[in-house]
Amino acid sequence: MTQPLLQAADLRGAACLTTDAVAGIACLVEALRTGDGAFDDGHDHAMAPCTDTSSRGGTRAVGGNAETSLRWLEGALTEDNVQPTVRPKHAALVAALNGVLGDYLAAVDSPLAIAMRFRQAGRPLLLERFALRSRLAGVAPKLLVLLHDLCLNDLDWQRAGHDHGAALARDLGYTPVYLHYNSGLSVSTNGRILARLMEQLYDAWPAPIERLVMFGHGMGGLVARSAIHHGALPQRGGLRWPTRVNDLICLGTPHLGAALEGSGRGVNILLSVAPHAAALARLGKVRSAGINDLRLGNILNAATGDEGTLDNARIDLPGETRCYAIAASLGSAEADRQTRLPGDGLVTVASALGKNRRRSLAFTDARRTLVQPASHLDLLSSSEVYGRLRHWLA
């Protein structure tokens, strides 16, 4: 069944595969076929970046065209859906593919297209009161919803032995649930789908919700803002949950856009956490609807006419929610001043804090913080970040 609520921005780039996409798929197929396929043996069987010759050879090996290559990948990677145990490396590869090709995968009804779900420990949650009570040990009245970044998945919140969600559960009594979504779709499409899904979660939560926190890393912060915006629109049917969000925390979120170079270098920072990263590098040049939104900091699609104001620059933070922004910088404060705050390698400090000379989102100074030295991915395991989270959410 086609992914619900697909919008024009998702479909424009999904009509056909670009040359880079075809070559990248062929590289990945070649890497998987020539490796031993043991995704969970602790080794990354990445190859050197594919040449044009090897890309063509990889395509020929599975039948000579991109469609055949994708079908081969579907057979190799979707077995994760029926396995009794979670296979993190399979999940990482599928998430990476969705980040760069997710709009295409959804448009052609590929089994590789991720359908949005709430998960815990990599397994979907049934949004029914008794099922949630049975599945989630000690359901708390403090609900924490975590939203991952572009090309990542819900398992990537676990980094360097730390998970902000699990730590907040342990120390402050929150119950975390993790969103798993197709990050190649436009932010607005994901926001619309999430708005409805959040209402289902809110209605099914087994305990009275005393505090509702949304916590987004990178693109996840934009998706959270989009969902709150969509959920509050009168034409959405008066959803209840948007006005009940107490806190929104944005971790390295490109509110004012991200520096995703044409070479794909910025996207490759995120693809680097997936197995066969070198083979995926060719896909770093592909621009899904989600990547284009991340580059611009969009939370709406200007191409559609049912979203209220279509000017992303006029959309501020949700007024009834405490909003926090955490930025990272790879260098020292002095080095940042000299280089105009280069940021975390993907998102500038100004963009993550939502403030530059032309625009300033309504984060108060007390709710903006800079962590350094740290990269975009270091934010997921930073003890300094966690200290701020504990302070804000206690």
Image: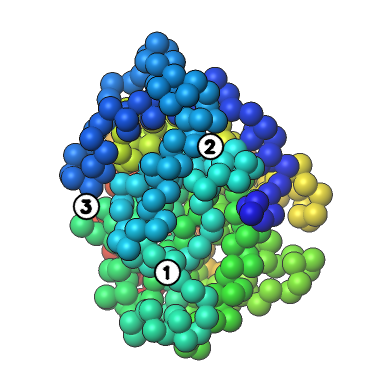
Q: Nearer the viewer, residue 117 or 53?
A: 53
Type of amino acid at the residue the image marks with label 3: Ala
Applied colour scheme: rainbow
The label number, if any, that marks residue 101 in the structure image? 2
Question: Up-down: is 244 above or below 348?
Answer: below
Q: Which residue is drawn at 48% across and 79% down?
A: 211
The label number, if any, that marks residue 126 in the structure image? none
Q: Name the residue under label 3.
A: 160
Which quadrant of the structure image shows residue 123? bottom left
Callout 2 touching callout 1 (CB < 8 Å): no
Give the mark, 2 or 1, whose residue is nearer the N terminus.
2
Residue 121 at x, y percent in the picture: 33, 65
Instruction: Bin the neighbour count of mark 2 within 10 Å (Cα to Cα): few under 14, some 14-19, many 20 and up.
Output: many
Which quadrant: the N terminus? bottom right
Disc 2 and disc 3: Cα gap in Å? Answer: 28 Å
Disc 3 and disc 1: Cα gap in Å? Answer: 20 Å
